[in-house]
Image (tube, helix red, strand yellow):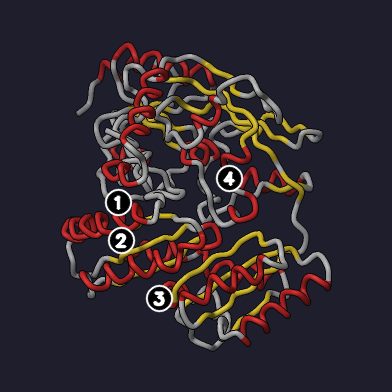
Amino acid sequence: MTNPALIDELKTLVEPGKVLTDADSLNAYGKDWTKHFAPAPLAIAFPKSIEQVRAIVRWANERKVALVPSGGRTGLSAAAVAAHGEVVVAFDYMNQILQFNEFDRTVVCQPGVVTATLQEFARDKGLYYPVDFASAGSSQIGGNIGTNAGGIKVIRYGMTRNWVAGLKVVTGKGDILELNRDLIKNATGYDLRQLFIGAEGTLGFVVEATMRLERAPKNLTAMVLGTPDLDSIMPVLHAFQGRLDLTAFEFFSDKALAKVLARGDVPAPFETGCPYYALLEFEAGSEEVSNAALELFEHCVEQGWVLDGVMSQSEQQLQNLWKLREYISETISHWTPYKNDVSVTVGKVPAFLKEIDAIVGEHYPDFEIVWFGHIGDGNLHLNILKPDAMDKDAFFAQCATVNKWVFEIVEKYHGSISAEHGVGMTKRDYLGYSRSEAEIACMKAIKEVFDPNGIMNPGKIFA
């Protein structure tokens, strides 16, 4: 439902032409990659400065209008979906890298800087921004911070949280806070910066971020190894971690690989068919490291943990091996997958995965299940693909039943119902499987402090 008076007021807060209300824009900016909720925003606002963001937030408080932040809209938990007449605050025009400090190896970014842009900037400076994932070409730094994005390098470099040196935020009350001021050591009470990382815009909006950079890795090399069963993957991880500093350790099933190969964009890694595959990456800075990797491969074959494998010999082959893993999400999106992003401690992964696989297979034998994930850090992605002939709503309804069973197993293993995608609306009703009542009460109390009128991304994380 439109409200011309409110929209006219909103238009005075940003530059001319930076409030959109046409149907195409409302649909495009009112959603993320999830397909569970229909977008229905009131308007899309594009601020170009911190003061404009602040003005929008203060106006929203006065008018009791809800706000939803929008970055690259690549999220998978509906945290950036505006389904109830909210104003979407899109940061596309706050997309500049403002400052580089070579001594501290930090970069000051606006929230709309695309992840790949920061990666390229770091590369040009001979440095490295290690948070990486398939959507890096369109996701934005503000959204990465809002969801504490993880990705494929967490085993070595950690989550987005590890790389945020400082934040400037506009709170739900319209206050501007500078948090941590980029310090490495700061022991002056609560680190409020950490509250905003992973808060999904429910406490306020990130309007500037200082991100740390790292030494660039040398001669990254990947191996893809085929295993006879899931139980073999963890001994392989243990063997390689014992001698090499891995930058990544991923896994995917034969079904996931088959979907990617069917695209025709990338060749099969080898001829041997295997039920599961591990992709690992490391810095081969010397011949000694490369030889150690080959020795470990031979050892794993001798133990029966690996059936076949390949090691990249060039940058192009490295990229092709990574495509086998990185193309999975995009490829299976054509089947309207029901996604679950869960985690347990690394040692519990095989038993955990088997329990979930057995339950889904028993109750829904006609559903195709695609597994992949960052198994080196305990993060698994369960994807249930919608049968072509099945109605989407009926499919999601059945998957909601699966969710309950899956999350009961997550709770049993003391895991997380959302390892890196956030909570948003898709996981909101299941938060109790990973957080106690006392924890949730504390989180709600924190939100009250920063957002007393409840205008900041309401209905996300908890009701």
Q: In the image, is 246 to the left or to the right of 396?
A: right
Looking at the picture, which amino acid does disc 3 mark? Lys
Disc 1: CA contacts within 10 A as few (<14), some (14-19) or many (>=20)? some
The residue pinned by badge 4 equals 115
The residue pinned by badge 1 equals 35
From what the image shows, is residue 435 above or below residue 11?
below
Number of dots carrying numbers: 4
The residue pinned by badge 2 equals 336
Q: Is residue 166 visible?
A: yes
Residue 115 location in percent, x, y? Answer: 58, 45
Q: Residue at x 66, y 70 (%)?
A: 240
Q: Residue at x 66, y 80 (%)?
A: 297
Looking at the picture, which amino acid does disc 2 mark? Thr
Residue 246 is marked as none
Front tag of 3 and 1: 3
Q: Secondary structure at mark 4?
A: helix
The residue pinned by badge 3 equals 255
Q: Is residue 24 visible?
A: no
Q: Secondary structure at mark 2?
A: loop
Front tag of 2 and 3: 3
Q: Residue at x 53, y 49 (%)?
A: 150
Q: Disc 3 and disc 1: Cα gap in Å? A: 22 Å
Counting residues from the start of the chain, the first of labels 4 and 2 encountered is 4
Q: Secondary structure at mark 3?
A: helix
Counting residues from the start of the chain, the first of labels 3 and 1 encountered is 1
Q: Disc 4 and disc 2: Cα gap in Å? A: 26 Å
Q: Would you say the residues marked 1 and 2 are in contact, meaning their CB atoms lie under 8 Å apart?
A: yes
Front tag of 3 and 4: 3
Residue 354, quarter of picture: bottom left
